[in-house]
């Protein structure tokens, strides 16, 4: 589709790449393939101004400053077409086809983003730096940062020596000041660092103490327990000159005043954290690796996000079963739009191209693996369609299964061997769940795979990608949708499972799941249900709903997140939650779980209550000895009357001398 507000400036790397404009087509209203980008950008800029373009996609590896200077006022989008298309894919047709897909996906996703402003918070970072080291080179880094002390009040570089220090002379006075790093809490600009003096070198005293710092540098051979990488915490396992110089540069860049992006928004109205005084869920708190999420002090049934501490890994968004937490950039809409666009042409070219594989990759090692493949011309399948996410824990089961529903032959998760954001239990939960679903629909659980890499092993990761993609046959499903009607995780999952049932014809029935997963089947014992509506009123996901017209209670299984609120508020104790997922078409829609006939008023004959509710009220009241007089004589059937008639009869009895 021709995008009138967009232009695309591509280059052939000074004629070293065979970039053919005819094969690229016209993804934007102005498209240029340049050989000398520094010169040709000037003519492109003039034409862009004449056409009043707002966005320019830059597929060129020249310095970004060239384009920023030539195209002021325009939003620039940089796309590595050389590294992700033309360098690793020697087949020209396949390389051009993938390049077009990536351009179209960038345009579509960015158009969604253009109408939204990401909120920010002011952040001031001072010049207090703590260096904890077991290398003598830590002293050199401290001297490199000495100038920070002079850059403002309160500036200081504090050197802390590990008991495992190497490279210091035996008589060095620093050996008498050794401490162990115990814990690090807080965030950039406000860290609390707990240390413990070494007993042997501190006269036997091991009284722990705290240091406050804006940043922390840790030079140790292995990552210390209780310490994880985050913005402002620099973890180094070696101390060469280049590494020290780069670290010093990074430390300096983080000193000053900034605008910190708000990564997550929160909608308390659909949060399953609790209600009516009952605390439930809390998955976001459990899976946040940086303790940036907690319960509100004034209302513990709701959560709060410390936006200054949040590192934007996306774990909470993936963990939240109701999508009360949403990521600001990339939004779920952008992810699904990008995915759908990348896979759109695959539907039309089945058999002509490599099987399409969506590869979610993190912005750390996943990005580096693909970048290295482009630089070293390491070949891999042109069917690999990359989508960058902040961290693999951002990827939900809905993302992975939606990719399959949209026509992917497989889904790869490419990231760090040792994730800087900590343990990835949540990712493995999502991964196992996705494989379970694929297995029960006979789609092949081997179509999803996690591939990790560490520094220096990028080529091995590409080999693993090739091994994965080579085993994949054509996509097992035909796309039945291109743009989701909703983008909440559970709504997407419902739509995806509906498509799986329709295309495969399989309905596996009940599947037992771990209680750690936010899925549950609510079984309602109808004979004891009084249709009081408590479950429908408290359910945060509308899994239960009550229809007045036919006096019936309905349950939509796919909506249930297993928070347990309904089970706890049910006055008759007739609701039981089971950790199961029912893979059948009826479970994706509302199903009747309880109904009852209405009782008419004994006087006016107007329907006013259902039978089981009335019988429950009567049985409880009639058991109370002190109330037997109340329901005697003319008042014997007062409960069988509607509220209006009951009031009239009661007042008449009072006039006759009855004292209630």
Image (spheres, rainbow, N blue to C red):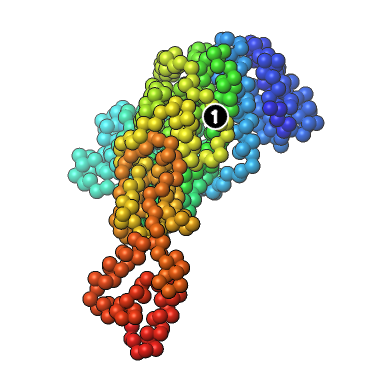
Element type at mark 1: loop
Q: Residue at x 23, y 76 (%)?
A: 625
| Relative image position of residue 50 (x, y in whole percent) | 80, 31
| Residue 431 sits above or below residue 577 on the image | above
Image height of 525 relative to 178, above or below: below
Q: Position of residue 508 (x, y in %)?
A: 36, 31
Residue 572 in sight from this viewpoint: yes
Q: Count every numbered label the image shows and give the total.
A: 1
The residue lying toward the viewer, choosing from 45 and 652, is 652
The C terminus lies in quadrant:
bottom left
Quadrant location, the N terminus: top right
Q: Position of residue 25 (x, y in %)?
A: 69, 19
Q: Is residue 210 left or right of residue 118?
A: left
Q: Which residue in the structure is indicated by mark 1?
A: 480
Horizontal arrangement in the rendering, residue 161 relative to residue 604 (left or right)? left
**Residue drawn 44% across and 45% down?**
590
Label 1 neighbour load within 10 Å: few <14, some 14-19, many 20+: few
Q: Residue at x 27, y 32 (%)?
A: 164
Q: Residue at x 33, y 36 (%)?
A: 510
Q: Is residue 574 above or below residue 481?
A: below
- The residue closer to the viewer here, 634 or 560, is 634
495 left or right of 51 in image: left
* Nearer-the-camera pick, 167 or 82: 82
- In this orientation, does residue 218 appear? no
């Amino acid at each position: 589709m021709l995008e009138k507000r967009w232009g695309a400036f591509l280059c052939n790397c000074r004629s070293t790449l065979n970039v053919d404009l005819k094969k690229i087509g016209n993804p934007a209203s102005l498209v240029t393939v340049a050989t000398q980008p520094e010169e040709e950008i000037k003519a492109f800029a003039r034409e862009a101004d004449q056409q009043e373009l707002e966005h320019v996609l830059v597929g060129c590896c020249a310095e970004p400053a060239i384009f920023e200077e030539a195209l002021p006022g325009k939003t620039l989008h940089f796309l590595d077409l050389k590294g992700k298309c033309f360098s690793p894919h020697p087949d020209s047709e396949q390389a051009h086809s993938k390049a077009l897909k990536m351009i179209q996906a960038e345009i579509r996703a960015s158009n969604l983003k253009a109408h939204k402003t990401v909120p920010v918070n002011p952040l001031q970072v001072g010049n207090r730096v703590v260096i904890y080291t077991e290398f003598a080179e830590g002293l050199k880094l401290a001297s490199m940062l000495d100038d920070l002390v002079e850059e403002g009040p309160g500036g200081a570089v504090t050197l802390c020596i590990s008991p495992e220090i190497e490279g210091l002379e035996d008589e060095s006075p620093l050996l008498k000041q050794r401490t162990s790093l115990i814990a690090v809490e807080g965030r950039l600009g406000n860290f609390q660092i707990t240390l413990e003096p070494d007993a042997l070198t501190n006269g036997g005293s091991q009284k722990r103490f705290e240091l406050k710092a804006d940043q922390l540098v840790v030079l140790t051979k292995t990552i210390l327990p209780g310490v994880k990488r985050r913005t402002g915490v620099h973890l180094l396992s070696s101390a060469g000159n280049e590494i020290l110089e780069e670290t010093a540069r990074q430390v300096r860049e983080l000193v000053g005043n900034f605008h910190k992006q708000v990564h997550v928004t929160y909608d308390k109205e659909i949060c399953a954290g609790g209600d009516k005084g009952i605390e439930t869920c809390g998955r976001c708190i459990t899976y946040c690796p940086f303790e940036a999420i907690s319960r509100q002090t004034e209302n513990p049934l709701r959560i709060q996000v410390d936006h200054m501490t949040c590192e934007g890994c996306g774990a909470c968004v993936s963990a939240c079963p109701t999508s009360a937490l949403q990521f600001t950039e990339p939004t779920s809409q952008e992810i699904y739009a990008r995915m759908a666009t990348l896979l759109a042409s695959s539907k039309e070219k089945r058999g002509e191209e490599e099987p399409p594989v969506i590869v979610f990759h993190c912005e750390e090692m996943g990005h580096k693996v693909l970048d290295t493949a482009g630089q070293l011309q390491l070949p891999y399948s042109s069917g690999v369609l990359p989508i960058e996410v902040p961290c693999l824990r951002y990827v939900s089961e809905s993302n992975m299964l939606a990719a399959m529903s949209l026509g992917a032959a497989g889904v790869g998760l490419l990231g760090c061997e040792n994730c800087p954001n900590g343990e990835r239990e949540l990712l493995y939960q999502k991964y196992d769940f996705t494989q379970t679903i694929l297995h029960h629909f006979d789609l092949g659980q081997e179509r999803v795979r996690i591939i990790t890499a560490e520094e220096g092993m990028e080529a091995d990761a590409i080999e693993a990608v090739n091994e994965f993609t080579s085993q994949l046959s054509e996509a097992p499903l035909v796309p039945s949708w291109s743009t989701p009607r909703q983008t909440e995780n559970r709504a997407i999952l419902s739509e995806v499972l509906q498509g799986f049932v329709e295309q495969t014809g399989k309905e596996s029935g009940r599947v037992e799941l771990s209680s750690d997963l936010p899925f549950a089947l609510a079984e309602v014992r109808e004979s004891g249900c009084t249709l009081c509506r408590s479950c429908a009123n408290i359910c945060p996901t509308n899994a239960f709903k009550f229809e007045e017209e036919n006096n019936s209670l309905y349950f939509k299984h796919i909506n249930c997140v297993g928070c347990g609120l309904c089970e706890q508020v049910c006055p008759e104790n007739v609701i039981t939650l089971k950790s199961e997922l029912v893979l059948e078409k009826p479970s994706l829609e509302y199903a009747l779980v309880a109904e009852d006939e209405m009782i008419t008023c004994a006087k006016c004959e107007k329907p006013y209550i259902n039978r089981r509710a009335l019988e429950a009220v009567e049985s409880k009241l009639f058991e109370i000895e002190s109330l037997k007089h109340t329901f005697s004589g003319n008042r014997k059937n007062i409960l069988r009357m509607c509220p209006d008639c009951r009031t009239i009869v009661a007042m008449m009895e009072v006039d006759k001398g009855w004292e209630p």
